Amino acid sequence: MVGGAAYRRRAHRRHRRGTRGTGLRLGTAVVTTYPRHPLALAGQALTVQAATGNRLTLGIGPGHKHQVETALGMSYERPARHTREYLSALMPLLRGEPVRFDGEIHHVAGHIRTPGARPPSVLLAALGPVMLRTAGELADGTVTVWTGVRTVATHIAPLVTAAADAAGRPAPRVVVNLPIAVTDDPGGARAWIAEHFGGSRQVPSYRALFEREGVSGAGDVVIAGDERHVSGELRRFADAGATEFIAVPFGPPEQIARTLTVLGGLNEPG
C-alpha cells in the first residue's frame, strides 16, 4: 500500500507538471479523419485539452487514397467534400456548441461538454488549391510536409491567407514540417532521407509538390548543413510565410544532439 501511495503521488506530480509546469505545446500532424466520426474526434481532442492545460494543436487531414482504401478498407471518394463537411461539423463541436449537420457524406447530431477545455487550434493538412482554400476558410491554418521554401512562398502561404481574408478570419497559421540535420555531411543526410522516404514521390500529392518546387524528391527538400546554413534556411521559410516550423531531427545520436542544440538556441530570447 505504501508503494502504491508513493506511485500515485509521483503520478500526480507528473500530471501537474504536464498540465501547468511547462509552456510546451502539443500537436498532431496529422490525425486521419476518415476512420473518426467528428463527434468522436471532438471528444478526444477536448479531453486532451482538459488534461494538458489547453496546449493542443489539432492537425487533421483526410490522408491518402492508398492509406484509406488499402489499410482501412474505406472509400476515398470525394476527399475535398469529405473534409469540408467534416470541418463544418468539427469546429462548432470543439467550441462546445450543439451540432445538427446533415451533409452529403457526414451526418452529425450531438454536443460535447468537457469542463476546463477550450477549443484547440485546428490545422488542416493541405497541399492542393481546394484544400488550402478550405484550410483558410474553415480551419486555423495549414500544416504541410515535404514542402520546399519556394512552394511555401508562391503556393501555400498565398492561397491559405487569401482564403482566410475572404472569409473574414484571422491570419492563418502556416506550419512547415520537415526533417532537419545539423551536419558536416549534408549530402549523406540527404541520401539517407532519399533512401528511407523515396517512396513519397509515388504519392500524387507529394509528387506534385516536388514538381512545383523543381526537385526530384524528399531528399532535396530536407534542411541539412552546418549551423549557419540551417539557421539561414529556417529564416528563409519564415520570410516565405511560414509562421511555425516542426523540426524533425534525424540521423545518428550525435547528429540529433547537435541539431537539437542549434534549435534550442534559436528559441532563446535575443
Image (spheres, grey):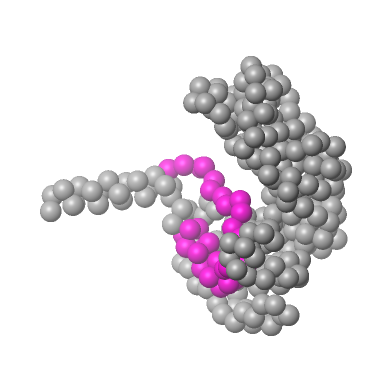
Residue at image location 83% in from the left, 56% down from the top: 129
Q: Where does the image place residue 139, in percent across and percent down from the top left?
A: 71, 60
**Residue 41 within the magenta-colored segment of the rendering:** yes
Q: Where does the image place residue 151, in percent across and percent down from the top left?
A: 82, 42
Task: State the extent of the magenta-drawn residues as a range.
Answer: 21-50
In this rendering, position of residue 133 left or right of residue 22: right
In this rendering, position of residue 47 left or right of residue 164: left
Q: In this view, does 11 lie above or below 91?
A: above
In this rendering, position of residue 245 left or right of residue 239: left
Residue at image location 68% in from the left, 40% down from the top: 198
Q: Can you tell which quarter of the image residue 76 is in?
A: bottom right
- As drawn, the residue found furthest toward the left would be 1
Residue at image location 73% in from the left, 51% down from the top: 203
Q: Which of 250 and 159 is in front in this view?
A: 250
- Residue 227 visible in the picture: no
- Residue 220 visible in the picture: yes
Residue at image location 64% in from the left, 26% down from the top: 189
Q: Where does the image place residue 58, in percent across and percent down from the top left?
A: 59, 56
Q: In this view, does 190 lie above or below 67?
A: above
In this rendering, position of residue 181 left or right of residue 8: right
Q: Is residue 4 above or below residue 166?
A: above
Quadrant into which the C terminus falls: top right
**Residue 52 within the magenta-colored segment of the rendering:** no
Q: Can you tell which quarter of the image residue 220 is in?
A: top right
Q: How many marks?
A: 0
- As drawn, the residue found furthest toward the top would be 184
Q: Which of 205 and 106 is in front in this view?
A: 205
Q: Where does the image place residue 241, in percent across and percent down from the top left?
A: 79, 41
